[in-house]
Amino acid sequence: MAHPSDKKPSKSGPRKPVRAARKAVGKKTDAAQRPTAKKSKAKIPPKQTDRAIAGTALGAVPPKRTLSKSLKADADQLAKRSLHTKVKTARGRKLSSTLWLSRQLNDPYVARAKAEGYRSRAAYKFLEIDEKYKLLKKGARVVDLGAAPGGWSQVAAKKVGAKGKVIGIDYLEMPAIENVQLLQMDFNDEAAPEALKAALNGPADLVMSDMAAPTTGHKQTDHMSIIALCESGLDFAEQVLVPGGCFVAKTFQGGAANDLLARLKKLFKKVNHFKPKSSRADSAEMYVVAIGFRGENR
Ligand SMILES: C[S@@+](CC[C@H](N)C(=O)[O-])C[C@H]1O[C@@H](n2cnc3c(N)ncnc32)[C@H](O)[C@@H]1O
């Protein structure tokens, strides 16, 4: 097939040799790189363009395309803007964190907790538990395991009043709560039970545990970890509860594991499982509420 440049021979006679063609392209390349390239490109006569094509076909480096200064500035700004948007949206957050944040912002219990002065939406779970099982009495002595940020302790302190006692423990730091004694330590630390007993200075009417380790996403691992926390809470409850006392602990759907359930039934007169309305429907959490500690071994 004939090359386009073959169709219209140059006025100056036959086609130039390869070297001349390359030279011509070189000239055009220089011109294209000058700032006025855009204007001069529009004026390039077809003959010159043909030469450039011929030169390219012969292996010459095609003229380097450059953005005009203003276009480049716009492109840079666009690039920066799109980077900025990404950073702003993600801000180093994982998708799960972004979803959590959006859920928090749209959660009526979060809004209610803020309006009513509770430190966490979890306060409503305990309010529901107490409304159903009437666990808290004026002057009662309560231990709150995994207390931070403090919603359950706030509810308990209000209900037991100044004559009651509430001791909270969490490895997270939390600001003081009126009428609540807070210990910042890991409940699994071997010194924790003694520290709690010293703060309690007597028996307890209620031991409650909302303890939860950060979830791993692996269902069985998370289930086992919550059951282990529930068991160690029960070990402690067994040591400090008054006869007739109560134990509340977070477990997972399906309730307490069989061994744990058998133990609870042996230790308490009544064992119930309860899922408060304020507990998110998509969460597998539920609570075991054990009432009437027999206290036979003490
Ligand atoms: C769901 S939050 C408790 C919310 C609390 N009931 C409230 O109303 O604000 C679970 C808490 O358990 C605590 N926790 C988990 N394992 C613990 C442990 N071994 N010792 C002490 N606290 C623990 C966590 O630090 C976390 O603050």
Image (cartoon, rainbow, N blue to C red):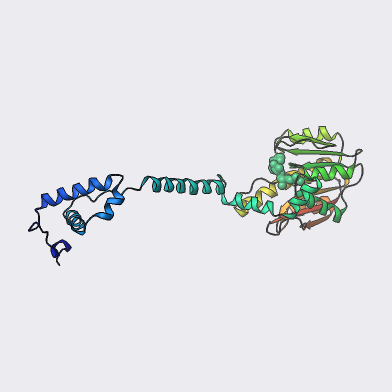
Residue drawn at the location 84% of the way across and 37% of the way down: 178
Q: Whereabouts is ligand 1, in terms of quadrant?
A: top right
Residue drawn at the location 78% of the way across and 39% of the way down: 168
Q: Quadrant of residue 204?
A: top right
Position of the N terminus, as image quadrant, is bottom left
Q: Quadrant of residue 185?
A: top right
Q: Quadrant of residue 240?
A: top right
Q: Residue 113, can we see it?
A: yes
Front in this rendered view, residue 157 or 2: 2
Q: Residue 241, can we see it?
A: no
Tell whether 214 sits left or right of 166: left
Residue drawn at the location 77% of the way across and 33% of the way down: 195
Front in this rendered view, residue 137 or 100: 100
Front in this rendered view, residue 4 or 296: 4
Tell whether 43 sits left or right of 263: left
Residue drawn at the location 73% of the way across and 47% of the way down: 230
- Relative vertical location of residue 283 with respect to residue 234 in this rendering, above or below: below
Front in this rendered view, residue 183 or 157: 157
Q: How many marks?
A: 0
Residue 268 position, x and y percent, is: 84, 51
Q: Residue furthest bottom?
A: 1
Position of the C terminus, as image quadrant, is top right
Residue 11 position, x and y percent, is: 10, 59
Residue 191 position, x and y percent, is: 73, 33
